Amino acid sequence: MDQGETEKKNARISAEDIIRAKCILDDYRAQMAKLIVAQKDMIDGLLMALIAGGHILLEGAPGLAKTLAVKSLAAITGLEFKRIQFTPDLLPADLTGTLVWESSQGTFSVRKGPVFTNIVLADEINRAPAKVQSALLEAMEEYQVTIGENTWPLSDPFFVLATQNPIEQEGTYQLPEAQLDRFFLKLLINYPAGDDELQILKLNNSLSGVRQGSKPPPVETVLNKQTLETLREWANRIHVDENIDRYIVSLVAATRPQATQKSGGGFDMPSKTGREGIYRYISYGASPRASIALHTCAKIIALFAGNSFVRPEDVKKAALPVLRHRLVLTYEAEADALDADAIINRILSSVPVP
């Protein structure tokens, strides 16, 4: 890389590029709003992960438009989309592919699985056993799949969106922590408010039959691979002050009960009182992947907000979706009816803001 390219890479984002990014974001939101009512956090989170090149774990009750949102995203971006329904009898080869014997040629040929696409919807991922869930690990982490003796690169971009139902646990297999850590974000989908549900009724007031949901979403393609790469470049040029970086590291380190006994290196840790009040609820904290994801998310959130630099508020906004699936809570947290979001909010209030 020559000096000119290095200076361009390290240059701050211009006001014109911020305006252009805002226009792209507005077009994307407008298209998603044609079929998805409210759910702003989910809509922005999908694009955020796609820009960052990460994967999403989407949790919500049935009927909250999780699958529809992913189909709409694929249509808006013009990317290839495939859906995999996870079931207890699913095999790893059903995801990644397998070798097929060709008797006429006397050799094996490769039959690639549905992960060879741009956007993969892993529907109800916790309904398949661990050996099937782990088949996605290589694809999600290394963006490649090994079939037989050969390794095949996956499409670029490659984006996994996995869903799970929080209210049905019978016959499911809890995702292991190693796989949860590979999801860039975990988004929670809640029931719509009364006015929002009334708007949903108005959007679906035609008597077109039960097959209405199988039709492609009537949206325009306003994003493409080049646009996503441009948005990623702009996000990389968002300025992050060193104090913000230290704040990010302090937040993630504050999720680790063992690490918070020391506060060397000038990083701000919760007080002793704060540790005693929080860490009896945490068995294990977040890994350095969380620091990287929090840093990346904060930059994209700043870009979405039309700012050229990251504020502490951007980090706080990214904290819940980045950290909630990376904490392993104790039984005491469950007994006290505390979930990961409640613990993270306590940590946010205990770590000093720069």
Image (cartoon, rainbow, N blue to C red):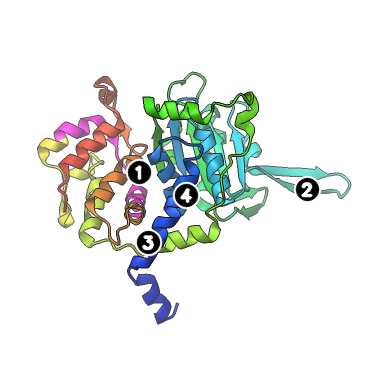
Q: Which mark is residue 230?
A: none
Of marks 1 and 4, the one in the foreground: 4
Instruction: Indicate the secondary structure of the residue bearing disc 4.
Output: helix
Q: How far apart are marks 1 and 4 (CA)?
A: 22 Å
Give the residue type at disc 4.
Answer: Tyr
Instruction: Indicate the secondary structure of the residue bearing disc 3.
Output: helix
Q: Which residue is located at x 21 percent, y 39 percent?
A: 347
Give the residue type at disc 1.
Answer: Val
Which residue is identified by label 3? 19
Give the residue type at disc 2.
Answer: Phe
Image quarter for residue 121? Answer: top right
Q: Is residue 83 left or right of residue 105?
A: left
Residue 30: x percent and y percent? Answer: 46, 46
Which residue is identified by label 1? 322
Q: How far apart are marks 1 and 2 (CA)?
A: 43 Å
Q: Is the magenta stretch mostly helix, strand or loop?
A: helix
Sequence-wise, which precedes: disc 1 or disc 2?
A: 2
Whether 172 is drawn above or below 43: the answer is above
Residue 264: x percent and y percent? Answer: 16, 54
Q: Does the magenta stretch include residue 278?
A: yes
Which residue range is magenta in the image? Answer: 276-297
Q: Does the magenta stretch include residue 5?
A: no
